Image (spheres, helix red, strand yellow):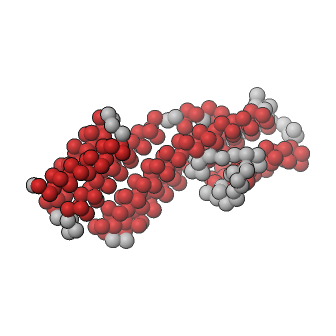
Amino acid sequence: MDGVYDGARRLSFKTFATIYIRSFFSQGSWSPKYRQSMGFASCMEPVGKELWTDFEDRKKFNLRHIEYYNGNPFMATLVLGAVAKMEESLRYSEGISEEDIRRFKKVAGPATGSAGDRLFWSNLRPFGILLGILCGIFYGLWGVLIFLAVFNIPTFILKWHWLNAGYRLGPKVMIEIKNPKLRTSERIMEISGSIMVAFLSVAYLITLDYTPAVSYIGTAGLFVFCFSMLKRRFPLYVIFPVAIAAAVFAAMII
């Protein structure tokens, strides 16, 4: 390993910005055997250029990051930031080994896959779609822009936050993956999305002109639905159809 540590502990902003931009294309090259390894290696390349100048060291760096990696593409910046920190520690002999980095990637990838898929695919995307449909009913094509904004703005912000959080925490990124704020936001989107689906279902099943009377009755039914949801005594797939049926029945008989 060449060079002498000069006290600069942080990678340059340019390197961070390059990692961030490249992270949006991390699935541009995908392999059934190594999954997202090429995309991960491409994102890490700026780190290697800044830390390693010796050819052999740079070669070892690249080989480390074309090994198997798979995780949620939106939470990948959390792992990228942590691995960048670990590579920096390896470069300056601060108690991190190459094997530590390999083991960390194998563990962190699936962890972000589970948390990220739940947050983005199971909650944020359906929530954005439902909100877009609801807005589309009243405001036309603006509903499309609402969906794009609801899904992409949080994604852009979180990816940058996770890049910095990963670098700050290093191998302790499980603290961020288990952040209770993520679960709270998921719960809010679950309940809000269910409310919107129930509202649309009641409005569609009862009338096609979405009259105020039906809206008020549906709202009353949804209040019961939300209360039941918060009790958490039954799974969503049981509470949801029951709540819709109750709201529809109330609107038909009143």
Q: Residue 102 occupies which quadrant of the picture?
A: top right
Please report the residue visible at 58 percent of the width from the left and 44 percent of the height from the top: 113
**Quadrant for the C terminus in the image:** bottom left
- Residue 232: horizontal and vertical position, in percent? 33, 35
Most extreme residue toward the bottom is 141
Quarter holding the N terminus is: top right
Answer whether residue 74 is visible to the viewer in this image: yes
Residue at 77% in and 49% down: 66
Which picture quadrant has residue 28? bottom right
With 251 as the anchor, is 229 left or right in this view?
A: right
Residue 254 or residue 85, whichever sits in front: 254
Whether 224 is drawn above or below 198: the answer is above
Q: Position of residue 202 (x, y in %)?
A: 24, 57
Where is 220 relative to 146, above or below? above
| x and y percentages locating residue 84 in the rendered image | 70, 42
Camera-side residue: 14 or 241?
241
**Front-most of residues 240 and 230:** 240
Left or right position of 124 against 232:
right
Counting from the top left corner in percent of width and height, residue 23 is at 64, 54
Residue sitting at x 55%, y 42%? 114
Does the rendering let one see residue 46?
no
Q: On the picture, is 234 further left or further right than 168? A: left
Please state the total of marks drawn on the protein image.
0
Q: Residue at x 27, y 39 (%)?
A: 228
Q: Relative to residue 83, is residue 252 drawn left or right? A: left
Residue lying farthest to the top in this orientation? 95
